[in-house]
Amino acid sequence: MPEPAARAMSTADHLSRLSPRLIVPALVAAAALLGLAVTHDARLGLAAAGALVFGAFLVVDLPVAVGIWIVALYLAGAPGTHGAVTGTSVLLLAGWAGTLADRAPHARRAVARTRWALALVALMMLWSACSIVWAQDAGVARLGLQHWAIAVAALPVLVVACERPRDALVVAGAFVAGATLAVIAGVLTGSNAAPVDQQASFEAAAGRLQVGITDPNYLAADIVAALAITAGLLGVPAVRRFRPLLLLAVPVLLYGLVATQSRGGMVAAAVAAVVAFVLLREYRGRILGALAVVVVLLGLFLAAQPRAVDRLTQDDTSGTGRTDIWNVAVRVASDHTLLGVGTGNFVVVQPGYAQRVGFLERPGMIVDTPLVTHDVWLQALTENGAIGLALLIGAFGACVLASLLAAGRFARAGRPDLAHLARAVAVGQIGSLAASTFIANGNDRVFWVLLSLGPVLLAVELATGSAAARPNPSAASAVSPAAPAPSFPDPSR
């Protein structure tokens, strides 16, 4: 029996064998609880209904549940989504853990295939945990470590949850769908979304596109990655029926990129375009077309909102405060070069450096409401030292390298479409990393979903690679006509 046919029964297989005497009472109980919830509070009833639907996908199709969770991450904090991220995250983790036994064969192979990426990420997190020992405020360090752990957890969850190329396509499609819906939600809600902090409130007042608690600069970086992944998905025959939706998403995403007024997003788009010219040679014409559309949209947007011209063309000395924070961060890093000040502790030590860096354009952002460095590399250097920065670069680089390795393996396995998708994911990852020079997004969950796509594609290539390595069934039957034809998995799955 071929190895894929011998894999353990899925949770859905087990449930299909349950007696109706167990299923019917469970459904009745769920319906009764839902009815009580609706009677008590309509919003609670809606949340309960959503939880039941999400729970059903967890049982029947875990990758689809992962996709729903990714969309929820994008819409975090948007009106009507209160508690959606926390709820789906808890349910997803529970469902993932509950199906580990079913996925054990794939999990072992996937972990072995991506062990170097997982190991570097684990070392990065271990060093971050060690910094609690020398952190000035251990409580802040533990909280920062918790935020990082929640975001980084996306990597093992996605690598184990996605077993087939089809699963990777679902996750990639959800990434694009989430970015598109975030832009639409941002346009519909305007600046009414709850600001995450004073800086986010300032961004909304300036007329920049944002959704929920997502900073405009973060959203711009995600949009650049989503555009690259869209280009990759358009080349996959298996998603042919979704091509109209993907094509409709492109202008929405391009508008969203411009409407965020993010200089970091524009830099990310330029970097991604250059990398795409190298990796996606067959799409060079379309890349030039997309850049032309961005220029046109940017011109129209700036004509309609003259204030945005000042933002995109001004240097940071005009008062956004980023230069002040960078100057302080450089001084902190020079004093704590090897070990750093501890995870999350840059904001703790920052006020003490206000008198040591000279003139500050916006001293309030250093003393009264200290903020993060707005630079993921500088954040790592100040908080975890040169060792932490090296581990961070290694972890991020491993995820990008996984995308490129997956592209090569897919090409050799006879799947040029998936090879194209893997290269497009690498383009999106590199573009987003370029934007990270202007945002401290290392503990952002959407960012880690993007990074995880590389190891995911490398892991699911095992399905196509093993299929390509098996003998041709027609050749086997020609040698032994009486022998039954062997069963081969569909490589598109």
Image: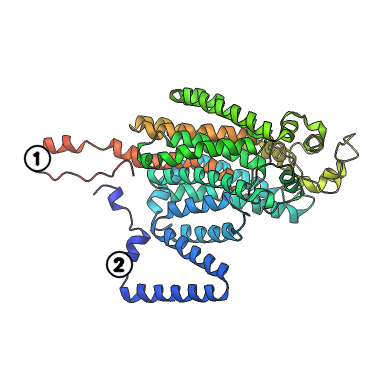
- Label 1 crowding class (10 Å Cα cut-off): few <14, some 14-19, many 20+? few
Front-lying residue, 191 or 492: 191
Locate residue 244 relative to residue 492 in the image: left or right.
right
Q: Is residue 402 visible?
A: no
The residue closer to the viewer here, 101 or 221, is: 221
Q: CA distance from mark 1 to mark 2?
A: 37 Å
Indicate the position of residue 344 as horizontal and vertical percent values: 73, 48
Residue 229 in picture, x, y percent from top left: 49, 37
- Please, is residue 319 above or below residue 71 in the view? above
* Secondary structure beneath label 1: loop
Foreground: 483 or 76?
76
Compared with 246, 368 (above or below) is: below
Name the residue: 36% across, 72% down: 23
- Going by the picture, which residue comes out furthest to the left? 482
| Up-down relation of residue 156 to residue 406 (above or below) | below
Residues under numbered marks 1 and 2 in contact, where contact means CB atoms less than 8 Å apart? no
> What residue is disc 1 on?
481
Amino acid type, mark 1: Pro
Residue 17 image point, x, y percent: 30, 67
Q: Quadrant of residue 417?
A: top left
Q: Residues within 10 Å of mark 2 (few under 14, many from 20)?
A: few
| N-term mark: 1 or 2 | 2
Check disc 2 and give the amino acid type.
Answer: Arg
Query: Is 143 left or right of 364, judged from the image as shown?
Result: left
Determine which residue is flagged by label 2: 17
